[in-house]
Image (cartoon, grey):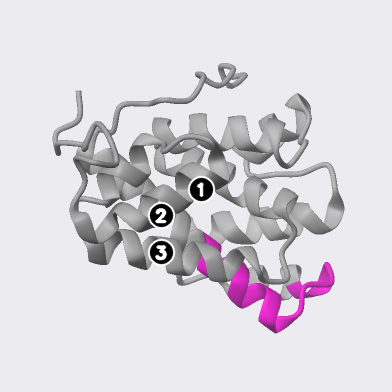
């Protein structure tokens, strides 16, 4: 059970957030618990949706974004985000089970994506203080400085949702992901 009450419906959310939740409903066909939870704070929901929307129009493709989300969720131990991004990764980004498992381990079979995921984990693990070698490796794999900044922004976005869900203990409303191999 969530430690912060989650509005059960759009109608129970603060009036200021209902239009955003209705847009989520239209886009996804449902309103996941994370969105309804964030709706308790119009500023939090607007901040999340604004950054998420801007990054969705960025240079990183959906497959790379989902790999980063999976890696960060696994590293931060966020069960909600892990379930959500395993589902999104498989169904929307069309990542296969092996690639989802690799992302959870901070890797990818695709060399360029691997560099992005490794860098995302380095940023997460070092709390932003990635080493010069980490930056050199992601650049050497072909990522531009602008794309590197987007990778960092995706780490921040995913860390935000990881922390929100861990603080609130948001009820997971996505299928449980496969257990990670030891």
The residue that mark 3 highlights is 127
According to the picture, the residue beneath numbered tag 2 turns out to be: 159
Return the x and y of residue 8 as percentages of the image width and height.
Answer: 24, 31
In the image, taking residue 125 as reference, residue 65 lies left or right, namely: right
Q: Earlier in the sequence, mark 1 or mark 3?
A: 1
Q: CA distance from mark 2 to mark 3?
A: 10 Å
Q: Label 3 near label 2: C-beta < 8 Å?
A: no
State the image coordinates of residue 177 (x, y, percent, origin top left): 55, 21
Q: Earlier in the sequence, mark 1 or mark 2?
A: 1
Separation of residues labelled 1 and 3 (CA atoms)? 12 Å
Judged by depth in the image, the label closer to the viewer, 1 or 3, is: 1
Closer to the observer: label 2 or label 3? 2
Q: Is residue 181 above or below residue 77?
A: above
Q: Position of residue 89 (x, y in %)?
A: 67, 37
* In this picture, residue 17 sits left or right of residue 57: left
Tag on residue 72?
1
Q: Could you classify mark 3 by the number of other residues whose Cα lies within 10 Å: few (under 14), some (14-19), or many (20 or more)?
A: few
Earlier in the chain: of badge 2 and badge 3, it is 3
Q: Quadrant of residue 12?
A: top left
């Amino acid at each position: 059970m969530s430690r912060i009450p989650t509005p059960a419906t759009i109608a129970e959310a603060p009036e200021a957030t209902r239009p955003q939740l209705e847009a989520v409903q239209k886009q996804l066909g449902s309103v996941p618990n994370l969105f309804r939870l964030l709706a308790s704070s119009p500023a939090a929901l607007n901040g999340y949706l604004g950054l998420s929307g801007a990054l969705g129009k960025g240079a990183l493709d959906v497959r790379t974004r989902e790999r980063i989300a999976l890696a960060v969720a696994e590293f931060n131990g966020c069960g909600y985000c892990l379930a959500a991004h395993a589902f999104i990764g498989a169904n929307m980004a069309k990542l296969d089970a092996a690639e989802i498992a690799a992302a959870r381990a901070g890797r990818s079979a695709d060399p360029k994506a691997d560099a992005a995921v490794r860098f995302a984990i380095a940023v997460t693990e070092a709390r932003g203080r990635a080493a010069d070698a980490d930056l050199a490796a992601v650049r050497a794999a072909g990522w531009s400085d602008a794309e590197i900044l987007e990778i960092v922004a995706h780490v921040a976005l995913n860390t935000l949702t990881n922390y929100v869900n861990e603080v609130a203990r948001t009820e997971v409303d996505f299928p449980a992901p496969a257990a990670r191999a030891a």
